[in-house]
Amino acid sequence: MIIKTFEINKRKFDNQNFFLIYGENEGLKNEVIQNLKKNLKGSVQNFDETQVVNNKEMFYEKIFNQSLFENEKIIIISRCSEKFYEIIEEVIDKKISDIKIILNASILDKKSKLRNLFEKNKELIIVPTYKDTSLTLVEIAKRFFYNHKISISQEAINLLANRCNGDRGHLKSELDKIFIYIQDKKTINLEEIYKLTNLAENFSINELVDNSLSKNSQKTSEIINESNYKSEDGILILRTFLQKAKRLLNLYKIKDKNISYDNLINNHKPPIFWKDKPIIKKQLEIWSKIKIEDLIVNINKTEIFLKKNSSISLMLIFNFIYETSRKN
């Protein structure tokens, strides 16, 4: 049964156990899955298709073996493809109860057996996600700037929307980047939007910072050498470091001895995107609470020094990045 994205919050799915969310709009797919999780009951478990395909017995055990402590489960399978067709067909035939299974797939053509299975069965829910229109992205951006009381021209908003390739997930990443960049400012101009969103030819700043925090010095060096960062990118790189360091510190503050890193990350509010979870887990294993606190102090000191020595800002930033990525 085909359901449109805006219908997810208007319907109850008490009698449906299987959901397929597919399409090229990663941001919209993530929104749909988050809304489903709010409306469904049960503890959430996340898997990648490869994990399940390589270990079907583990997957079947999760589904068919009832736990005395977990009566209801929500199982999310990411990056699904046609490989998953036979597995989900077998699970559907078993008539499971108290378990909701959400499949997250990319583009599926009309001949897809997985797509046809869900479209033709009224007991199965399929939600296609298409590219967002420019108008939709403009409205999302307007709402963001209005809520944060940030002054911006319509021309700058249009530029921002046009650079997001019809994906609200890309737009959200750009808005997060802008929010980090402006800090206490209440206005942003067209030139700043152009510079901030013109980093597509470079590796993502998020990727650069994540590799540095993960102590992957070789990959960090490759990103720096293969990208063309400009002096004005320095502050954004530092503030991305600061945002990610503060998130790690917050996770450490709420962690107790009896909780694993996986559970800590899965239960974090606001929810951490599934692609970021392995990276954050690795960073938690590498950094201690004290070292993260020291890093935050060092980031703030570096930003002050950077503003006083703008002519050598890139050299200062790269030195900071290399120092952070160096293994103890």
Image (cartoon, rainbow, N blue to C red):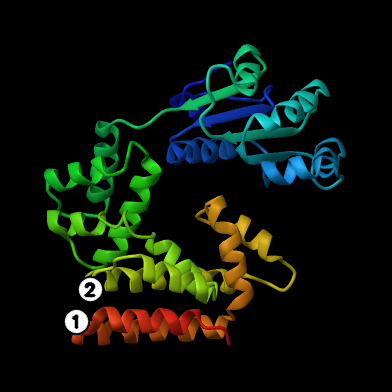
Q: Dividing the picture into quarters, in which one does residue 134 lie?
A: top left
Q: How many residues crowd mark 2 within 10 Å: few (<14), some (14–19), many (20+)?
A: some
Query: Dividing the image into 4 quarters, which one contains the N terminus?
Result: top right
Q: Is 145 left, or right, of 281 in this rendering? A: left
Q: Give the numbered dot on residue 231.
A: 2
Q: Position of residue 301 (x, y in %)?
A: 33, 87
Q: Position of residue 123 (x, y in %)?
A: 67, 17
Q: Residue at x 12, y 48 (%)?
A: 153
Q: Are marks 1 and 2 in contact (CB under 8 Å)?
A: yes
N-term-proximal mark, 1 vs 2: 2
Q: How many marks?
A: 2
Q: Is 125 left, or right, of 94 in this rendering? A: left
Up/down of 185 relative to 221, above or below:
above
| Secondary structure found at label 2 | loop
Q: Residue at x 41, y 72 (%)?
A: 241
Return the residue nearer the eye: 28 or 232: 232
Q: Give the numbered dot on residue 310.
A: 1
Q: Dividing the picture into quarters, in which one does residue 265 lie?
A: bottom right
Q: CA distance from mark 1 to mark 2?
A: 8 Å
Q: Amino acid at mark 2?
A: Ser
